[in-house]
Image (tube, rainbow, N blue to C red):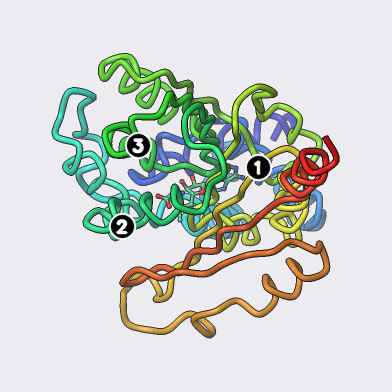
Amino acid sequence: MESMTMLVKELTIDIKKKKELHSLDDDFVSERINLFLKNNSKVYATLKKKDISKVKRSKEYTHIMKIIRKDLREAYGMFILPSYDKKRVDGEMNNILATHQSSKERMHNYLDIYGRIWKSMDTKKTVQILDLGCGMNPVSAPIIIDMTKANITYSAYDISSQDMKFLNQYFKEHKIKGTATALDLSKEEEFHKIKVSEKEYVVCFMFKLLDTLETIKRHTSKKLVAYMTTVADIIVVSFPKTGISGKKNIHTDRRSWFETFLHKESCKYEIFEVVNEIFYIIQTKKQSKRKIQKEKN
Ligand SMILES: C[S@@+](CC[C@H](N)C(=O)[O-])C[C@H]1O[C@@H](n2cnc3c(N)ncnc32)[C@H](O)[C@@H]1O
């Protein structure tokens, strides 16, 4: 085997042969492999000694593929439904929402969810929505626009460039003022790339994102929420109430670790629930500062 780069390249190609993972960016997959090899130097040393034709048939190579595919499935693949590749920007909204597990589950609750969020906001006319780890949720933007009649800018972020390309085309097709950008939110040093409006009231959605982020890098979710409390006016975090099979209850319905964290951050919050999802509407530090300033003036 010539080099680590070559091994990582071959592994990336093979890992992405799994249908549910093929839309992922090569860099995102390669980074996970590099990290694995760094933490498992013996495995790399064994593979390094072998010829490329033998490497691919080795048990070490199969083992790495299995481990990385499992990680990527938990972070991304398990939400991709069989109809995902067939979605079209000019298709019915519900048909697109139904290609992704998370938006499919809340498809019939959007009016209720967005109604409750809008009620909790101070300003309702000119709003930037930041949708982090967005999946196909931005496809529901027309529901918000119709319901609120607000001037909305939609900024969506997730890991796959291919998915973001689809969302950008969707925004264009539906004349929505929006952009979708590929970004790895598990990297603290990338947080500044989230483009936050200074003029608009900023609402940040993190729907069912935090559990997923934790599977990639522990404690990133707290760092991300803490960062967003300084730049967004309100944050709306949601967690699933049931596992993806719909059978087992994930921990408890409420997330005590998250509530403890919010208390530590001195953030006030309210909770509401729809069938299988629990939402936290969080008033941020930025908003508290603004209120104090308003009272002073
Ligand atoms: C459970 S889904 C939720 C999707 C969407 N927020 C919703 O609720 O409809 C989790 C999302 O997080 C995204 N994700 C996972 N790891 C990520 C990362 N490191 N950076 C950005 N997004 C990530 C996945 O691609 C997936 O779309």
Residue at 41% across, 31% down? 163
Q: Amino acid at mark 1?
A: Asp
The quadrant of the picture occupied by the N terminus is top right
Which of 192 and 62 lies nearest the eye of the viewer?
192
Residue at 57% across, 44% down? 122
- Measured Cα–Cα span from mark 3 to mark 1: 18 Å
> How busy is the neighbourhood of tag 2: few (under 14 within 10 Å), some, or many (20 plus)?
few
Q: Amino acid at mark 2?
A: Asp
Q: Is residue 86 left or right of residue 145?
A: left
Which of 36 and 181 lies nearest the eye of the viewer?
181
Q: Is residue 223 left or right of residue 249?
A: right
- Classify mark 2 as within 8 Å of ligand 1 or not, answering yes or no: no
Residue at 75% across, 45% down? 291
Label at residue 112: 2
> How busy is the neighbourhood of tag 1: few (under 14 within 10 Å), some, or many (20 plus)?
many
Residue at 76% across, 30% down? 192
61 relative to 180, above or below: below
Q: Position of residue 73 (x, y in %)?
A: 46, 55
Earlier residue among tags 3 and 1:
3
Earlier residue among tags 3 and 2:
2
Q: Is residue 114 left or right of residue 294?
A: left
Q: Where is mark 1, residue-wise? A: 233
Q: Where is mark 3, residue-wise? A: 148
- Measured Cα–Cα span from mark 3 to mark 2: 13 Å
